[in-house]
Amino acid sequence: ELFPALLVTLQVTVVAFVVAVISGLVIAILFTQSRWVERSFFPYAVILQTTPIVAIAPLIILWVRQIVPGDGSTFVAMVICAWIVAFFPILSNTTLGLNSADHNLINLFQLYRANPWQTLIHLRLPSAEAAVDRELGHLEAHVQQPIAKVRGCLALGLGRDVRRAAAAQHANG
């Protein structure tokens, strides 16, 4: 009975993690390529990151249930909540890493007339590698937290089994 719940948890974790890594990396690259984009949108990322997932999970569940019909809405809501938790640390640390390239080397690349994409691939991405690797190592546990919190509202995965065991223990008392 636990194995199917474990599979659901693993699916949500993997999907949210992969989507968070891809979207975080792409948006961080956009931020570093355009200061205007970074200054316009990064404050919203910080605001959403500081909002507790427990506060917005019910809203996400209601919103997703209106858009996605059937049982798939539960899975999508859990992936969105897990994505929110995983996305922002990836975005902020990747942006920080991409912007941490040595300014003297950036000037050297400009002196040799390297275009922004050459500078990104040959200078900024290698300098950001340590920050991104460190954050990806910590994120697996963070992705699990919103899944567990959302499951408090839903009857799916390991959260359902934990609630059942707690209710049985409370009843036996």
Image (tube, helix red, strand yellow):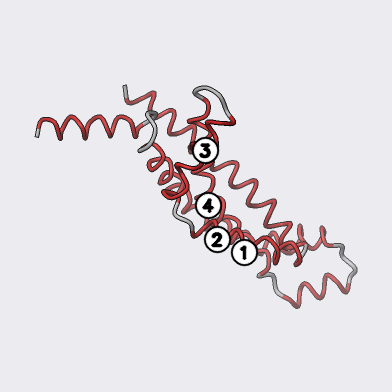
| Residue 155 rendering spot, x and y as whole percentages | 37, 29
Q: How far apart are marks 2 and 3 (CA)?
A: 20 Å
Q: Identify the residue at horizontal 76%, vertical 60% (top origin).
A: 120
Q: How far apart are marks 1 and 2 (CA)?
A: 6 Å
Disc marking residue 47: 2
Density class for disc 2 (Cα within 10 Å; few <14, some 14-19, many ≥20) is few
Disc with the residue nearer the chain's start (1 vs 3): 1
Disc marking residue 79: 3
Q: Under tag 2, what secondary structure?
A: helix
| Residue 95 rendering spot, x and y as whole percentages | 64, 62
- Which residue type does callout 1 highlight? Pro
Q: Under tag 3, what secondary structure?
A: helix
| Residue 80 rendering spot, x and y as whole percentages | 54, 41
Q: Which of 110 and 139 is in front in this view?
A: 139
Disc with the residue nearer the chain's start (2 vs 3): 2
Q: How far apart are marks 4 and 1 (CA)?
A: 22 Å
Nearer mark to the viewer, of 2 and 3: 2
Question: Which residue corresponds to mark 4?
Answer: 136
Snapshot quadrant of residue 99 = bottom right
Name the side, left or right, on which 148 lies relative to 89. left
Q: Identify the residue at horizontal 59%, vertical 61% (top origin).
A: 92
Do the CB atoms of the residues marked 2 and 3 lie less than 8 Å apart?
no
- Which residue type does callout 2 highlight? Ile
- Which residue type does callout 3 highlight? Val
Residue, far left:
173
Q: Under tag 1, what secondary structure?
A: helix
Q: Distance between the residues labelled 4 and 3?
A: 17 Å
Do the CB atoms of the residues marked 1 and 2 lie less than 8 Å apart?
yes
